[in-house]
Image (cartoon, helix red, strand yellow):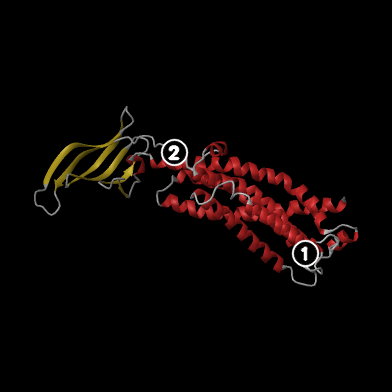
């Protein structure tokens, strides 16, 4: 049917436009947040682009769900407002028959959303955690930035190096403070170099400098001159990456009876079900009277989406905290969305008939 083809084509264009807008907003937000993490030393600045792309991949399922929902609303609201639906109704078709072209357009995207929620989401979280743990597991020498003071993880050592030659590993104007056994050791020298050991550990060797050793508030400081002073930097063991529920593959979650795994599984399964429920709700929500404003329908849609998504998060938390079981929690909100979509559809098709008569055989007729 020509009308159905036109509807699918317009839905495709609108979905693409909405998706581009949402993905741009999301990338902008991620850039600001991840650059903040990099500035604070929480992530490697060289990994910023990779981390942004991994985050985008993880949330594509959510963005697609919202994009399709908004696109259906925008297109159908315009069709009602511009009286294009009059042609649809004049052809002997009613509102519920819109589901055929709408679902025909949305079904491939629902498959994509399902795959992204079940497989891409845990994969992106796993890779993000892997990069984060790898950066946290680097040795202290790798954390030193020329021209800045750096405090070690256990807060007992402070480094300052004015400049570093990355090719020869030579360093200039070195300051090292070490605190052990209630005594402070300060070593300063004009030059030195970073030495890599065979076992993977590193040494900072500083030459021709002074060393000060003593206890704070005491007058027993020792001042020594040295030709060479070695600061040992132990190699950190590779961090043991223990995957969380968000990083665990979906197949493994099914086999884990623990509440956290079941809560994560509920969210992954619930995301495509929520996308389908939003599509079912969008058709009756988009119905507007051409004589009235069309913005109220969009406000209702935002209201329903916020409630739906928050209920999904709440049910996930209830299962993860062992307050509810998975089998009795994952389906009620989606069934409720289907019932609500059915009631709205019946109301839109027969707005003049009291709601209680719509359930009586012969009490309502499709328009």
Which residue in the structure is indicated by mark 1? 347
Picture coordinates of residue 79, whole percent (x, y): 80, 62
Q: Quadrant of residue 7?
A: bottom right
Picture coordinates of residue 197, whole percent (x, y): 30, 29
Q: Does residue 92 sit above or below 137 in this rendering?
A: below
Quadrant that contains the C terminus: bottom right
Horizontally, residue 300 falls left or right of residue 25, namely: right
Picture coordinates of residue 189, whole percent (x, y): 22, 43
Task: Give the crowd class for mark 1: few <14, some 14-19, many >=20 residues within 10 Å.
Answer: some
Local SS, label 2: loop
Picture coordinates of residue 274, whole percent (x, y): 65, 52
Asked if residue 78 can be seen in this view, the reply is: no
Say which residue appears at 38% left-offset and 35% top-offset: 238
Q: Nearer the viewer, residue 257 or 7?
A: 257
Q: Nearer the viewer, residue 55 or 276?
A: 276
Which residue in the structure is indicated by mark 2? 242
- Residue situated furthest left in the rendering: 220
């Amino acid at each position: 049917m020509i009308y159905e083809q036109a509807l699918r084509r317009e839905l495709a264009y609108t979905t693409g436009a909405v998706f581009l807008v949402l993905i741009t907003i999301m990338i902008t937000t991620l850039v600001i947040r991840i650059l903040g993490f990099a500035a604070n030393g929480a992530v490697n600045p060289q990994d910023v682009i990779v981390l942004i792309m991994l985050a985008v991949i993880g949330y594509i399922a959510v963005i697609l769900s919202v994009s399709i929902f908004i696109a259906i609303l925008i297109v159908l609201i315009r069709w009602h407002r511009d009286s294009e639906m009059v042609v649809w109704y004049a052809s002997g078709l009613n509102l519920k028959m819109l589901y055929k072209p709408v679902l025909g357009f949305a079904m491939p995207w629902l498959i994509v959303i399902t795959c992204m929620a079940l497989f891409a989401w845990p994969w992106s979280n796993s890779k993000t955690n892997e990069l984060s743990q790898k950066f946290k597991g680097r040795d202290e020498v790798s954390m030193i930035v020329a021209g800045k003071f750096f405090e070690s993880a256990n807060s007992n050592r402070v480094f300052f190096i004015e400049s570093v030659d990355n090719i020869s590993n030579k360093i200039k104007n070195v300051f090292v403070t070490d605190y052990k056994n209630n005594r402070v050791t300060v070593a300063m020298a004009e030059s030195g170099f970073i030495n890599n050991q065979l076992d993977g550990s590193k040494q900072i060797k500083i030459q021709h400098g002074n060393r000060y050793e003593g206890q704070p508030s005491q007058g027993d400081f020792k001042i020594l001159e040295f030709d060479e002073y070695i600061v040992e930097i132990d190699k950190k063991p590779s961090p043991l990456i223990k995957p969380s529920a968000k990083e665990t593959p979906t197949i493994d979650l099914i086999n884990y009876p623990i509440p956290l795994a079941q809560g994560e599984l509920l969210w992954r399964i619930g995301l495509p079900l929520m996308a389908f429920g939003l599509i079912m709700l969008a058709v009756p929500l988009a119905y507007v009277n051409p004589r009235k404003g069309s913005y109220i329908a969009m406000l209702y849609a935002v209201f329903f989406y916020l409630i739906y998504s928050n209920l999904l998060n709440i049910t996930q938390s209830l299962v993860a905290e062992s307050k509810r079981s998975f089998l009795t929690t994952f389906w009620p909100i989606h069934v409720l969305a289907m019932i609500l979509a059915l009631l709205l559809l019946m109301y839109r098709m027969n707005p003049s008939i009291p709601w209680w008569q719509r359930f009586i055989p012969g009490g309502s007729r499709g328009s």
